[in-house]
Image (cartoon, grey):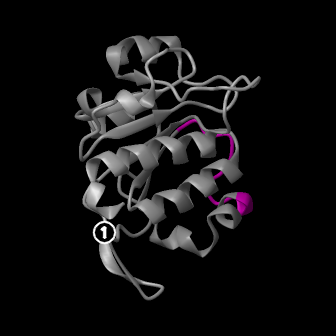
Amino acid sequence: LPKTQLFSDKKVGDVYGRKFISKHDLRVVLVNPEIPQNAGNIGRLCVGFGASLHLVHPLGFKTDAAQLKRAGLDYWENLAVYEHASLDAFFEEFPQAAEKGWALTTKVKRPFTSAEFAAGDFLFFGPETKGLSSEFLKKCGDRCLTIPIMGPIRSYNLANSVSIALFEAARKVQPEAF
């Protein structure tokens, strides 16, 4: 797998007649995502927020999958997206993620709104069917967060969870944009 980004990394520019600037350098990390439409929607979300997307293998789809591109529409070409052969390979390339990472899970009580997000943080999300492993969550310690569930569901859709957490992180890191 390439260690460099696959698409462009536009941080400042003029798109669709609107100026945009991202100062937060937030990174979304999908560990073993299974559903291409979720990854495509998350890619589009990352473009809109100026965040990068990291896909950690194994994936449940090919990155050239039509569903992935369809969900990301024509925004995919503006996405800073990276692929990593494994979680170990990811941490080799981004060792700072061990201290700047936040794990989103249903297995803890700490609400995501209590986090002190900072520029350059990594937001980790696990596979749709099982979430992040217990082993990974132990390593994250007090940097595990949850999105409260108030109704009779097991969890939120992955793309929805990413949008909730990324919005909150960007709002805290770059409040002047909101």
- Amino acid, disc 1: Lys
x then y, percent, for residue 96:
22, 34
Q: Main secondary structure of the magenta part?
A: loop
Q: Is residue 43 above or below residue 124?
A: below
Please indicate whether residue 149 sits to the left or right of residue 132 in the image. right
How many labels were placed on the picture? Answer: 1
Residue topped by disc 1: 11
Residue 84 in view: no
Q: Residue furthest right?
A: 152
User: In terms of image quadrants, where is residue 158?
Assistant: top right
Q: What secondary structure is marked by label 1?
A: loop
Q: Is residue 87 above or below residue 165?
A: above
Please indicate whether residue 81 sits to the left or right of residue 178 in the image. right
Instruction: Work out whether residue 77 or residue 166 is closer to the camera in this orientation and state it.
Output: 166
User: In terms of image quadrants, where is residue 97?
Assistant: top left
Residue at left offset 47%, top offset 57%:
46
x then y, percent, for residue 98:
28, 27
Q: What residue range appears in magenta?
A: 57-67
Badge 1 density bin: few <14, some 14–19, many ≥20, Cα 10 Å: some
